[in-house]
Image (spheres, rainbow, N blue to C red):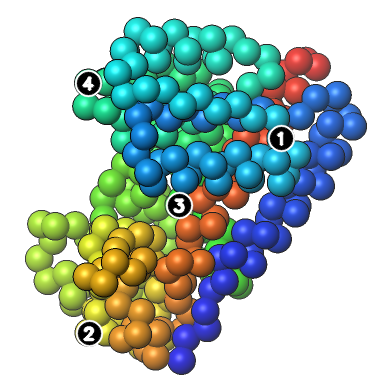
Amino acid sequence: MAEIIDGKAISAQIRNEIAAQTGEFKEKYGFVPGLAVIIVGNDPASCVYVRNKKRACDEVGFYSESYELPEETTQEELNSLIDRLNADEKIHGILVQLPLPKALNESEILLRINPNKDVDAFHPYNVGKIMIGNYSFLPCTPAGVMALLERSGIDVAGKRCVVIGRSNIVGKPMAMLLLHSNGTVTVCHSKTENIKEICREADILVASVGKAGFVTADMVKPGAVVIDVGINRNADGKLCGDVDFNQVEPIASYITPVPGGVGPMTITMLMKNTLTSAMLKATDNQS
């Protein structure tokens, strides 16, 4: 039976560390990290995320602002808000909740955020820095996965790693972070042939494909570490991941549950990125 990687417990541990670091930071520099979160429209899942981010900021001692804009918000209005937040000394991180309404140009918005305040690490400048391994911020979900592995004592170096999914938000940066940790990485996607055979070679298997129960027992090598990034609803409306947990858990050595695995880590890594941004600003002010 696999050891369950408890994302809630590890996330709480890291948040306690961030809260302590924030207290020291405030004492040293006289201000606290600030995060601005923008949501356009009233997507229910996005509204929940925004509330959770506000709660996390309060928990670790950050200053936060939330902007809940109507669906009809224009590109110019959103651009203007981002420009104002870019110039705001109290704000060190800017997060625009995706997806945006179709009338808005997502790429233009992400480009407009100051790369030094891009705590989602979606700006092409930060994506490029991740590629070469010289980065300040990491995308929150892949960073959360790496923290789970590290704090569970799982060494990536020399391991065969397989990532299912090639999104810009999870799959691609996940592959890069595993590579930076000296894993040998394969990325599988919808056009991959013999996907089951490839997955069965993985010492560390990361599923981020967005399909409930996609990873079944016959895709997992006995003793593999299985990380489930998926958040889906099954036919009964129950929250579940990309991995068929009941099938895979007896085979794996470690596994993350859904909920309670990778999910709690994402917002925690957002807090970490915001603290990093404030630290960069503080040291820049002193130089």
For numbered disc 1, what is the local secondary structure?
Answer: loop
Labels 4 and 2: the sequence-earlier one: 4
Spot occupied by residue 160 in the image (x, y as percentages of width and height):
36, 70
Labels 1 and 2: the sequence-earlier one: 1
Provide the residue designation for mark 1: 62
Left or right, 149 with respect to 188, comes to right
Provide the residue designation for mark 4: 103
Labels 3 and 2: the sequence-earlier one: 3
Give the residue displayed 69% in from the left and 52% down from the top: 15
Provide the residue designation for mark 3: 142
For numbered disc 4, what is the local secondary structure?
Answer: loop
Answer with the quarter of the image where residue 102 lies: top left
Quadrant for the C terminus, please: top right
Q: Looking at numbered disc 2 in the image, what kind of residue is underneath it? A: Asp
Label 1 and label 2: CA atoms lie apart by 45 Å
Q: Looking at numbered disc 3 in the image, what kind of residue is underneath it? A: Pro
Labels 4 and 1: the sequence-earlier one: 1
Label 4 and label 2: CA atoms lie apart by 43 Å
Q: Is the Cβ of the residue at disc 4 closer than 8 Å to that at disc 2?
A: no
Left or right, 105 with respect to 59, comes to left
Provide the residue designation for mark 2: 218
Give the residue displayed 51% in from the left and 67% down from the top: 260
Closer mark to the observer between disc 3 and disc 4: 4
Give the residue displayed 75% in from the left and 54% down from the top: 16
